[in-house]
Image (cartoon, rainbow, N blue to C red):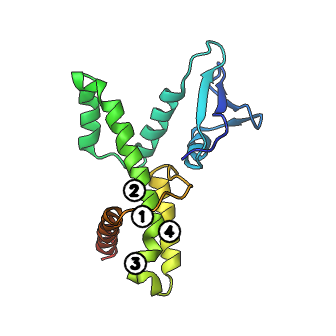
Amino acid sequence: MSDDRPPLLIKRYASRRLYNTETSDYVTLEDIARFIRDGREVQIIDLKSGDDLTRQYLLQIIAEHESKGESVLPIAVLTDLVRSYTTSANSIVPQFLAASFEMLRDGQSKMMQNMGKMNPMAAVPGFEAMQAQQEAFLKAMTGGWAPSSTPEKESEEDLAEIKQQLAELQDKLSKINE
């Protein structure tokens, strides 16, 4: 997940330029996205009004990535999000999304820790390079949200679930390479 440091404070000037208060230099949206992918929390404040603009800029980063063809959010999910703003479901959507991403981070962490242990492909030359690529891909997909601490010993049920997820991932990867 993110580190223990306080959020990186970014100030937006009237000129709309973004100023990194830690390094005393101007940054771009891509720089902010990189900070977040590296596990750093950010807070973007309007210098004049003091308003917190973090949500607005995070949404702008997502929109730019989606418009560049780096689509992560399927149309159905985007449609459901739009609907959630106009229905009474909007009260549960934030909690649902937060819980879903927490489960994704936990599953990713377990999968990456156990990938080499239970995978018969581990003996194949070049497997470690492929595993590193998969780790980088998953980190990029989740914005580096994988916790770095080692979890407690998993039960046999957890291990079976991880094996199933790994098998599904390998199946998808093999279909992509065809």
Q: Which residue is mark 3?
A: 119
Q: Amino acid at mark 4?
A: Gln
Q: Which residue is mark 1?
A: 111
Q: Which residue is mark 2?
A: 107
Q: Which residue is mark 4?
A: 133
Occupied quadrant, residue 10: top right
Quarter of the image that includes the C terminus: bottom left
Q: Earlier in the sequence, mark 3 or mark 4?
A: 3
- Count of numbered badges drawn on the protein: 4
Q: Where residue 64 sits in the image (x, y, percent)?
A: 46, 41
Q: Amino acid at mark 2?
A: Gly
Closest to the camera, between mark 3 and mark 4, is 3
Q: How far is mark 3 from mark 1, CA to CA?
A: 11 Å
Q: Can residue 70 be seen in the rendering of this structure?
A: no
Q: How far is mark 4 from mark 2, CA to CA?
A: 17 Å
Q: Earlier in the sequence, mark 3 or mark 1?
A: 1
Disc 2 vs disc 1: Cβ atoms closer than 8 Å?
Answer: yes
Q: How far is mark 2 from mark 3, CA to CA?
A: 16 Å
Q: Work out which residue is located at the far top of the displayed protein and give it.
A: 49
Q: Residues within 10 Å of mark 4 (few under 14, many from 20)?
A: few
